[in-house]
Image: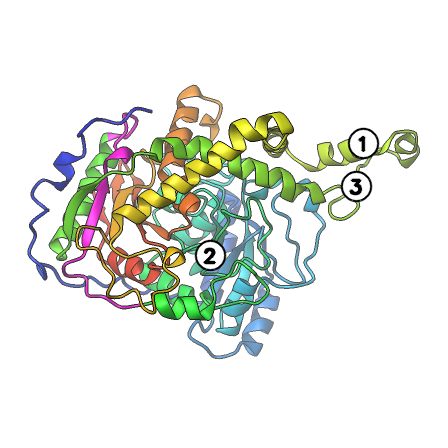
C-alpha cells in the first residue's frame, strides 16, 4: 500500500491563497417525511435490501406516536443498529449467541432521542458484533446497497451497512450505528449519505455492546448534515452511566463557534495511495475546491505514522474483543450449546464452553477472538500489543502537531482553548473515506477485494485510534455509485467539523 510521493500537490495547487470570505454558507436541505411514510418504505424496500433485522409493527408505532413527547425530533423515524440496546426488544448484534436476548434497558443515546420526540421504527442489519466491512457476516444474511446498477447487487459497507441503507432508501430520517474503525463512515460513503463519528466520549456508550471499548463510538447517519447536527446535539450530553463519557466542564471548555472564513484545511499526503481510483481522486479535489470557494485555505500536511495505523488497530481492537466477548459463554450471557446435556455432562468445562461459543459465534468473530487471544498471550504481548500502543500514541501526537487547536486532554490547566490556536496548524483535514465506490456484495473472497478492504480501513481507523471526530459526506457519483469524502478535526472540535461539512455538497460526475 505505497503512497505516491508528492502526489497530493495537485490537490492543493491554486487553493492555498483563497481569499477569506470568498464563498457563502451552503445549507443542507432538511428531509421531510413522517413515520408512516418510513413504514411504507420499509415494507417496500426491505425485502430487496435486507437492511433491517426487525421492524416495529404499524400499530405499535401509532401507539408510540400517541404518547410521543413534543420535542425537536418530533415524530422523526429512527433506526437503531442491532448492537445498541432498545428496551423490550431483541438486541442481537446479528449473532446466534444473542438471538433471543431481550434488553431490559434502553441505551442512553436511544433514550435521549425518544425523549426528544423520535420514534424507533426498527433495528438494522449488521456484521456480527461489528466485525466486518460489508454487512455480510451475521445471522440475518447480507444487506444490499440501495444504489444498484442493472441487476448488480453492491455492498452497503459495514458494519453499520443496514443503518446506512435504511437512511439512503428512506426507511428512516436518521439511524444510529457504531464506529470502531470506520463502521459508520464507510457505509455512509458507499450508500451516499452522511455518517458522523463524534469525538470519543461525546455520546454515551451506555447500552452499546462492546467490541473494542477504547475505540467504540456511537455514530449517526442521515441524509443531511443538518439532521446529523440536530440529533448530535440531543445526544451529546454527560452521562454518569458511562465513565468514559466527556464531563460537562470539559465540554464547556472546548465548545466554541468560529467563522468559516480563514479556516485552514489540511490535505494529508499519506492518504494518497496507489489503490485510490481516479473517481476517488477526482472527488478529493472537488471537495478541496468547494472548501476553498467557501473561504478556507487548503494546505499540505503530513502524518508519517498513518501507514502503521492498520496493524496497530487490528492488534488493539482484537485484543479488546477477545476480552469483551469472553462473557458470552452460555452461563453469564448467550445461548447455551444445543448439544444434548447428557453428552456435555461427560465433558470437562472447557469443552462445554467451546461447544457453546463454536455454535454461537460465526467464523469471522471466531477468527478475531483467536487472534486477539494470541496477541494477549505472554509471548506475543511484548512483541505486538505494547508496540501497537506506542504507535497509537505516536498517531495521537501527530494529529496534535498538525491541528491548530490544542488537545484538551493534554491542556487541562487551560481555562479556555479558543485563544490557543497555532497559526501554522490546520483546523481540519480532508481525505477520502474509501478508495472507490462500493464493490459487489459477493466479491468478499476475491484477492483484490481484500486489498481494497485493507486500504479502506487505513482511511478510517486513524480517527478511532486518536479519538478525534470524523465525518463522511457524499460529494460525487461515479457510474451511478456514490463516493464520499472524510473530514476530521481535533479532539472535541465536533461543532466546527459539522460546520465545515455543511459546505461540501454533492455533485454528479458520471
Which residue corresponds to the image point at 28% horizontal and 30% vertical from the top-left?
276
Residues marked 2 and 3 touching at CB (< 8 Å): no
- Residue 87 belongs to magenta span: no
Q: Is residue 285 left or right of residue 76?
A: left
Q: Range of the magenta residues?
A: 256-277
Judge by depth and name the residue closer to the eye, 330 or 16: 16
User: Which quadrant would the C terminus be assigned to in this image?
Assistant: top left
The residue that disc 1 covers is: 350
Residues marked 1 and 3 touching at CB (< 8 Å): no
Q: Is residue 193 left or right of residue 359?
A: left
N-term-proximal mark, 2 vs 3: 2
Residue 273 position within the rendered picture, expressed as x and y whole percent measured from the top left: 28, 29
The alpha-carbon separation of the residues under discs 2 and 3 comes to 32 Å
- Answer whether residue 138 is visible to the viewer in this image: no
- Answer whether residue 450 is visible to the viewer in this image: yes
**Which-is-in-front pick, marks 1 and 3?**
1
**Which-is-in-front pick, marks 2 and 1?**
1
The residue that disc 2 covers is: 175
Q: In the rendered image of this protein, does residue 385 appear above or below residue 160?
A: above
The residue that disc 3 covers is: 336
Amino acid at each position: 500500500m505505497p503512497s505516491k510521493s508528492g502526489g497530493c500537490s495537485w490537490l492543493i495547487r491554486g487553493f492555498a491563497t483563497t481569499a477569506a470570505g470568498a464563498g457563502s454558507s451552503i445549507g443542507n436541505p432538511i428531509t421531510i417525511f413522517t413515520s408512516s411514510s418510513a413504514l411504507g418504505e420499509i415494507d417496500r424496500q426491505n425485502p430487496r435490501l435486507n437492511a433491517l433485522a426487525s421492524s416495529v409493527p404499524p400499530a405499535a408505532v401509532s401507539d408510540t406516536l400517541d404518547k410521543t413527547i413534543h420535542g425537536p425530533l418530533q415524530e422523526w423515524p429512527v433506526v437503531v443498529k442491532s448492537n445498541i440496546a432498545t428496551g423490550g426488544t431483541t438486541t442481537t448484534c446479528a449473532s446466534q449467541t444473542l438471538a433471543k436476548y431481550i434488553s431490559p434497558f434502553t441505551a442512553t443515546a436511544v433514550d435521549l432521542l425518544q425523549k426528544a420526540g423520535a420514534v424507533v421504527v426498527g433495528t438494522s442489519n449488521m456484521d456480527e458484533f461489528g466485525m466486518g466491512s460489508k454487512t455480510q457476516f451475521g445471522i440475518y444474511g447480507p444487506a444490499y446497497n440501495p444504489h444498484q446498477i442493472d441487476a448488480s447487487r453492491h455492498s452497503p459497507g459495514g458494519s453499520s451497512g443496514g443503518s446506512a441503507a435504511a437512511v439512503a432508501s428512506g426507511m428512516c430520517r436518521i439511524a444510529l450505528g457504531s464506529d470502531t474503525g470506520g463502521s459508520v463512515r464507510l457505509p455512509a460513503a458507499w450508500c451516499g449519505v452522511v455518517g458522523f463519528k463524534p469525538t470519543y466520549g461525546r455520546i454515551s456508550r451506555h447500552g452499546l455492546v462492546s467490541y473494542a471499548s477504547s475505540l467504540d463510538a456511537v455514530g449517526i447517519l442521515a441524509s443531511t448534515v443538518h439532521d446529523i447536527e440536530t440529533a448530535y446535539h440531543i445526544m451529546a450530553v454527560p452521562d454518569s452511566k458511562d465513565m468514559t463519557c466527556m464531563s460537562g466542564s470539559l465540554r464547556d471548555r472546548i465548545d466554541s463557534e468560529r467563522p468559516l472564513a480563514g479556516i485552514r484545511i489540511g490535505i494529508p499526503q499519506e492518504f494518497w495511495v496507489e489503490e485510490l481510483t481516479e473517481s476517488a481522486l477526482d472527488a478529493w479535489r472537488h471537495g478541496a475546491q468547494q472548501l476553498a470557494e467557501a473561504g478556507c485555505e487548503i494546505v499540505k500536511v503530513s502524518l508519517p505514522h498513518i501507514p502503521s495505523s492498520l496493524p496497530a488497530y487490528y492488534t488493539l481492537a482484537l485484543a479488546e474483543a477477545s476480552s469483551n466477548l469472553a462473557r458470552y459463554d452460555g452461563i453469564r450471557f448467550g445461548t447455551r450449546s444445543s448439544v444434548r446435556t447428557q453428552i456435555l455432562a461427560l465433558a470437562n468445562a472447557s469443552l462445554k464452553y467451546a461447544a457453546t461459543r463454536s455454535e454461537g459465534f460465526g467464523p469471522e468473530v471466531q477468527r478475531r477472538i483467536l487472534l486477539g487471544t494470541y496477541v494477549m498471550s505472554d509471548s506475543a504481548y511484548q512483541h505486538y500489543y505494547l508496540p501497537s500502543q506506542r504507535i497509537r500514541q505516536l498517531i495521537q501526537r501527530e494529529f496534535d502537531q498538525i491541528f491548530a487547536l490544542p488537545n484538551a486532554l493534554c491542556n487541562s490547566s487551560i481555562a479556555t482553548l479558543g485563544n490557543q490556536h497555532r497559526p501554522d496548524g490546520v483546523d481540519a483535514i480532508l481525505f477520502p473515506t474509501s478508495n472507490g465506490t462500493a464493490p459487489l456484495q459477493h466479491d468478499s473472497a476475491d484477492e483484490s477485494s481484500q486489498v481494497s478492504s485493507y486500504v479502506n480501513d487505513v482511511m478510517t481507523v486513524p480517527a478511532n485510534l486518536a479519538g478525534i471526530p470524523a465525518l463522511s459526506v457524499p460529494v460525487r457519483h461515479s457510474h451511478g455509485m456514490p463516493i464520499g469524502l472524510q473530514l476530521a478535526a481535533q479532539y472535541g472540535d465536533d461543532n466546527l467539523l459539522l460546520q465545515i461539512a455543511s459546505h461540501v455538497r454533492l455533485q454528479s460526475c458520471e
